[in-house]
Image (cartoon, helix red, strand yellow):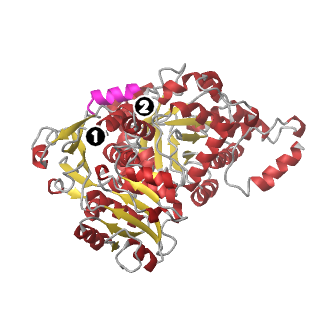
Amino acid sequence: AKERKNVIEKDVLIPFTDYELCIKNEGLMPPATEGDETESSLPSWNDIEWELQRMIARALLPPPIVGESATSGGANSADLLMGMNTFFLSLSFPKVEDAAPYVEEMCKDVDSMEYRVDLLASAREYLEHNSETCDEEDKKPDPRFDILYQQQRLRTLCRPHAQRAPALPFAGSDIIDNALPIVYTVRTAHQAGTWPDDEAGIRQMFDLLELGLRSAVEVLDVESAWDKQLTDKLLVRAQQRYTSLILGSHHVVGSEVTMEEAIELYRQCRISNRAHGAKVVLSINDNENNKDQMAYEASVAAAKMDDPEIPNIGLVLGEQGSYSRILNPRFTPVTHESLPAKAAPGQLTAAEIMAARVLTGQIPSQKYAILGHNIAYSVSPQMQGSAFEAVRLPHVYTRADVATVEEFVEGPIWNDDNFGGCSVTIPHKQNIIPHVDVLTDAAKEIGSVNTVIVKKDKFGTRVLIGDNTDWKGIFNPLRRKLGDDSGKKGSNGMALILGGGGTARAAAYAASKLGLERIYFNRTPEKAMDLAKEFGGIVAHSLDNDAESKDSLGAILAEHQGSLEVVISTLPAAADFTLPEWVLASSALPIVFDVNYKPYSTALLLQAMEKGCDVVRGSEMLWEQGVGQFELWTGRTAPYGVMKKVVLENCLPKSK
């Protein structure tokens, strides 16, 4: 039976499937008791269901684009996941369960975990199993299952503590916000690892790398020095069938290279422009002439030589290379103070690196604020402040409650050398525009700015960029609920947009990006007509179902044979607006979105929920647009779960 199973797996299941999920006896395990930490750390069927969801979510992501910048805000961007001041922890345990006592503390300081397959006990069993000299009768059970299963266990152990995990969108469901990314690595012997690098070993290494793809891993480390045919086969498969980010890597062990050779290694690690990031690790015999800075300097020089630019990671091995880990600004491998031993000599903890960067001025303490008037209610300071704290950035975020924009731009925050940017809310979203240097396409089209980002040009001069993330706060939740079918039904998918202010403009922009036809209604028809003129669409003069009045909502839907898929209200919560009953009497109910986050459930949302509609609250828009702001400011992934939690704590009704 075992031999038959192996044949079916090898000849049928693996060649004709893309992903693998490992199940032992979880279905037989009793559910974990709430509050019992011992029980909750044991494998359970909930873990299997969660892992299946994660794999599907990864499979449904858009393919990663080489060189995609953080400003594009892609859900699968190497520029963000391998972003500024991000860290991954290199695990060196032979069994993942050995790491269990340290996981909670480790997760507080890192953004990803490195799963070192070559250091696993089951990897040695894998080599023995595949040895050509091994007698068939002496072969142990195939350990590839255990290699996959232990990776799942690592995710399970990290889940309760993954506060720095980025958002993983899942169509038709909530965001998965507790999937800490994994870097899947099989490091060879001549590249500072343990995996055999003879011909047979390299062939088996590529088999294991494909196994990493089949586990829906976030980052696959691919050494750039080996067989070009095997490398090409792996990367073609990765591009065609998977969404994993490829990190091209090369380690120079035991010898020095010149600056020119180091630069060329970065170019090699691009692997014919198919890698999404490049990692080069050098060796030095001494530190004369600041050799420990060579990897960083070569990474900067190499970045300017090829297009598109990708994240470059540069380190120097050993104790003499410790400073290189402080200099390297992106995706730095670290150890942790709670661990019994370092994975490599010279490794520092994330806390040590961040402290050194702050001390040397590499990370200045920047000042941020929310600019508006009568904004004591705003949750943004708590949300952004908690996000900065979660990723150990030394920034501060305050309120700037002023009647005019001029008061702010002439004040101390705007003119501080360490001003990092600001959120902008009513009534200043239009008035801030003359005070920025550059507008993004979204800000131009929407005609309002809710985010100011500060950058430096090549001369060190401050450049103020005006952007708009409000539309993303509307677009992202609706896209998840509508799925990829939005706007693909011809012209019959329609969105009703209520209101005529700046947020209505963002809603119109988001609806157009979703491929929905727009219908506008506002008590001041001229404002609705302005929206239709700028964003396209139709103005409804009433929400009646009146076939005789061509400007009524009912007549417009009938004329265009349209289905109302989405209702977006940007009206003030105090208006207590509700929809006419006939709008919610259809068997195909619309998604109802209210941009107000206080109160948590407006009159419109209460009406929609009573009728059975799917709803989106303003609180979700708040943290979605805030996540976009955080990533624009910091150039790294946002701690999505932290920001969501803070918003809900401040918006949910207090129990009496």
Q: Quadrant of the N terminus?
A: top right
Q: Residues within 10 Å of mark 2 (few under 14, many from 20)?
A: few
- Residue 350 found in image quarter: top left
544 left or right of 461? right
Q: Residues within 10 Å of mark 1 (few under 14, many from 20)?
A: some
Instruction: State whether residue 562 is above or below residue 83.
Output: below
Rendered location of residue 541, percent (x, y): 31, 72
Q: Quadrant of the C terminus?
A: top left
Whether residue 75 is visible here, answered yes or no, is no
Whether residue 387 is in magenta: the answer is: no
Whether residue 255 is visible here, answered yes or no, is yes
The kind of residue on which mark 1 rests is Ser
Label 2 element class: loop
Instruction: State whether residue 496 is above or below residue 266.
Output: below
Rendered location of residue 247, percent (x, y): 51, 47
Q: Nearer the viewer, mark 2 or mark 1?
A: 2
Query: Is the magenta region chiefly helix, strand or loop?
Result: helix
Rendered location of residue 603, percent (x, y): 38, 50
17 left or right of 327? right
Which of the two residues, 308 or 444, is positioned nearer the viewer here?
A: 444
Ranked by sequence position, the earlier of labels 2 and 1 is 1
**Which residues, given as a range, are shown in magenta?**
351-361
488 left or right of 400? right
Whether residue 360 is in magenta: the answer is: yes
* Alpha-carbon span between mark 2 and mark 1: 21 Å
Rendered location of residue 71, percent (x, y): 35, 53
627 left or right of 1? left
Q: Which residue position holds label 1?
A: 378
Q: Is there CB contact under 8 Å for labels 2 and 1?
A: no
The kind of residue on which mark 2 rests is Ser
Label 1 element class: loop
Q: Which residue position holds label 2?
A: 655
